[in-house]
Image (cartoon, rainbow, N blue to C red):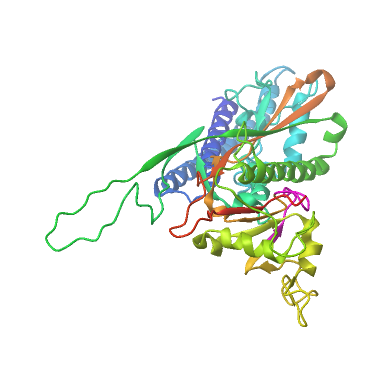
Amino acid sequence: MDYSEIIDTLQGDLLDLNEQVNNLQAKADGEQRELTEDEVAEVDRLMNQFEVKTDEIERRKKMQAQASRLNESFGRKTDAEGSTEKMEAHQKVPARARAEDSGKWGWRSFGEFASSVRAASAKSGSMDPRLIANAPTTYGNEGVGEDGGFAVPPDFRTAIMEKVMGEDSLLSRTDNMTTSSNSITFPADETTAWDSTGGIQAYWADEASQLTQSKPALKEKQVRLHKLTALIPVTEELMEDAPSLDGYLRRKVPEKFDYKIQNAILRGTGAGQPVGILNSNCLVSVAKDTSTSPVQPADTIRFQNIVDMHARMYASCRSRAVWLINQDIEPQLHTMQFAPGSNSPVPVYLPANGAAGAPYGTLMGRPVLPIESASTLGDKGDIIFADLSQYLSVTKTGGVRADTSIHLYFDYDTLAYRFIVRIAGMPWWNSAISPANGSATRSCFVTLDERA
């Protein structure tokens, strides 16, 4: 009986079972949800099979050891190229994932994964079994895959996405959805409650009179995902320092993605990227203050600007709105006064507990958030009053996808790391709304005109 081949087959089954479990969990993590009942049952079934296979491997190994002892006791000999050498070669056991490494396919860190990729790509290098089991090629291929890529384990992809969706990101404040497709279509009703010319209407009716009919006025909104990428060639020298590579990739790529996404939400053109708030048709732009003498100078912000912007924010959106500002305007906010020139002027903006307290305060009761994507002082977009829940963002299921290739820069002895996220965004509103009584339009996004 060839125990080595049987054990190899069983170990291959373990790798397959482990991959199936991790794929189920990765799918749920990518969609930011718990496992369904069916998925939980499937995971339990696969894990039970894993234990059964593990027990059988241990039993086979004991049988193999027993047979070897018998052979040694009877003085059985083999030549240098015979079955004994073959058995020793087959006794190399693929690495198995620890319980705490579930979802990482056995890798303890991104640096360990990168080092194994490097070792496999070197001349006469050794191939880690974990790479073979999860490479984008058929199982059992001991060489490099035809496309030269090794998939990055799902837990590392999740860790990269966490920073993009962090507390300081505008994306986390939007109406965010996920899709497995490259585009998504939504029905939308853009009529107001006081609109009397279209959509669903309500009428007063006399007793026993015929009711007046109306029907919905729905429009279709189609959003097509755009691709945000980062391609990072990594030199042989950098690969030698796995901890540095791990920290570098896990920090820099999310930082770059975070800024690009935030900048697109504010000022995206819609051409190959999301439609930004400042380029949207629903944006309301408030003119500088000309009612107070002297006329507002260039590159300034007055309390009247804040009052005018707040008045143009649709009332239902105020409780969710935030002030997005460039840090250049903070000195003017801190010195802004209500009733300046009077005997008792009142500061308009102060952080909680006064100037010695927390650095972030409020205006009109809403948080003030400094962001790098806002325009500099005096330019349109240096201060924006926005209800970001009225901004639709759509991300591809699975979040950030990360891959490596040893072929792209093969002649430079360099690995290429590629990170991709598919994302789309646009305001839910197609236009500002006209009030039931009055002429000044209102919106969920309000900014201040240039003060030149």
Q: Position of residue 133 (x, y in %)?
A: 61, 30
Q: Quadrant of the N terminus?
A: top right
Q: Is residue 396 above or below residue 359?
A: above
Residue drawn 70% across the image and 20% down it: 78
Residue drawn 50% across the image and 55% down it: 439
Residue drawn 66% across the image and 38% down it: 95
Q: Is residue 105 left or right of residue 433?
A: right
Q: Give the magenta range.
A: 368-380
Q: Is residue 217 left or right of residue 262?
A: left
Q: Residue furthest bottom?
A: 343
The verdict on residue 374 being magenta is: yes
Q: Is residue 56 above or below residue 302?
A: above
Q: Residue furthest right?
A: 237
Q: Position of residue 231 (x, y in %)?
A: 73, 31
Q: Position of residue 354 (x, y in %)?
A: 76, 76
Q: Is residue 151 above or below residue 341?
A: above
Q: Is residue 319 visible?
A: yes
The verdict on residue 249 being magenta is: no
Q: Is residue 73 visible?
A: no
Q: Judge by depth and name the residue closer to the eye, 62 or 242.
A: 242
Q: What secondary structure is the magenta-colored segment mainly? A: loop
Q: Position of residue 45 (x, y in %)?
A: 44, 44
Q: Is residue 97 left or right of residue 437?
A: right
Residue drawn 66% across the image and 59% down it: 323
